[in-house]
Image: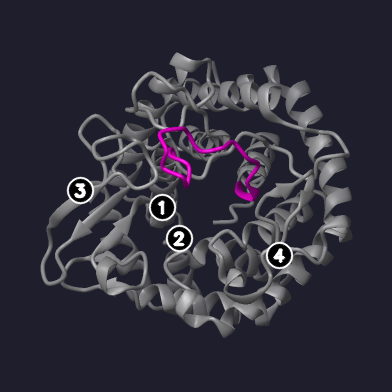
Amino acid sequence: MSYQNIIDQNREWIDSTFNKLDEKLSRTSVKSRDKIPYTTKNGEHDSRTTGPDIAWWTNGFWGGLMWLMYEATKKDCYRITAENAEKIMDGAFNYIDEIHHDVGFTWHIMSGASYALTGNRKSRDRDLFTAMTLMSRYNIDGEYIVAWPGKDKRGWSIIDCLMNIPQLYWASREIGDDRFKKVAMKHADMAMRDHVREDGSVVHIVEHYLDKVGVVKTHGGQGYGEGSCWSRGASWAVYGFILSYIHTGEQRYLDTAKKTAKYFIENVKKTDWLPVIDFKAPPTPVGFDSTAGAVTACGLIEIAKHVDDDEKDYYLSAAVNMLRAMESAWCDWSETEDSILQNGTERYWNERKDGSLGDPMPIIYGDFFFAEAILKLRGSDFLIW
């Protein structure tokens, strides 16, 4: 079946879901205009705007979501909220030690989108400045971008960073300096070698040598444990590698995106297209993570655009199946809940580490990636990354 035939067969659902997104987000864009949401409490968006919380790694997703919806609808309610979110985020520069490798999440999808859609030069400056901070985290001897500050983690890389390096690809093009792109590709090559296993599963955290290329050990991170495969980590790989392919044209990144995507697809089929928190965890207890499905769906749609015709059906159908399953099971379209996609999880274990699974919760990037995927299915060619 062709790419377009799959879209046409699901057109009614795609359009209906977009309309529900627009109806709800146009309302919350005004209601939560002065907030930087992470989750909801009793149905109301919280806000991470005070103290060091202003530099929290997810704080660009609200502005980014608003820009996605503005690009799709041209409604001022989205633009005004997006611009306000970016101004609020200037407060993060007062906590420079809290700014780490997640600047792509916090600024590129917000300030970068603003510059792309409006030409705002202040937005460009924010995006370039934070791209330079990401560049500064590169370990030349080990050939990886360091995830976090702190002496005990100076050699740590995490799979999530694949979603931040598009900011470096952009910076190279914007200022005509290929050093940014070269660093991004070095990190992507490291992730292929050290984070992706032969079966397509993914290691969340890798601890590297500080003075040479190589792995000291791996860590389970937010998954079940050492040797497991945290599903959102797998989703960062699926989307991250296809983004590196889009920005560079290097076949190895497309091949790796397909490898990790096939692993994800074959595992999520087992649970009716609803992703569990960790694909290599024990069969019980069972916990799910909607955010992993939303991120992966975005990656699968992009993969489907860049593979031969006989492969498109496999990736695009999987994306649609996941999105439809999640919309049915986990989307809240009511006026009493500010968030949309429910049942996200931060990690496999909850903070108490008492043997129970992390409490399900709505998380802002769940809404962001779910909306991004629906917009892709509608035909948007705006790549916010």
Q: Which label sits on residue 193? A: 3
Q: Secondary structure at mark 3?
A: helix
Residue wearing tag 1 = 160
- Look at 17% across and 67% down and name the residue there: 142
**At which x and y percent is residue 188?**
31, 55
Distance between mark 4 and mark 2 Cα atoms: 20 Å
Proximity of marks 1 and 3: CB atoms separated by less than 8 Å: no
**At which x and y percent is residue 197?**
22, 37
Decide which of tag 4 and tag 2 comes sooner along the chain: 4
Amino acid bearing label 1: Asp
Residue wearing tag 4 = 117
- Look at 75% across and 64% down and name the residue there: 82
Q: Which label sits on residue 37? A: none
Of the pair 280 and 71, the residue shown nearer to us: 280
Q: Which residues are magenta?
A: 348-365
Quadrant containing the C terminus in the rendered view: bottom right
Colour scheme of the picture = one colour
Proximity of marks 1 and 2: CB atoms separated by less than 8 Å: yes
Distance between mark 1 and mark 3 Cα atoms: 15 Å
- Look at 25% across and 40% down and name the residue there: 226
Q: Which label sits in the foreground, 4 or 2?
A: 2
Q: Secondary structure at mark 2?
A: loop
Amino acid bearing label 4: Leu
Q: Secondary structure at mark 1?
A: helix
Q: Which label sits in the foreground, 1 or 2?
A: 1
Q: Which label sits in the foreground, 4 or 1?
A: 1
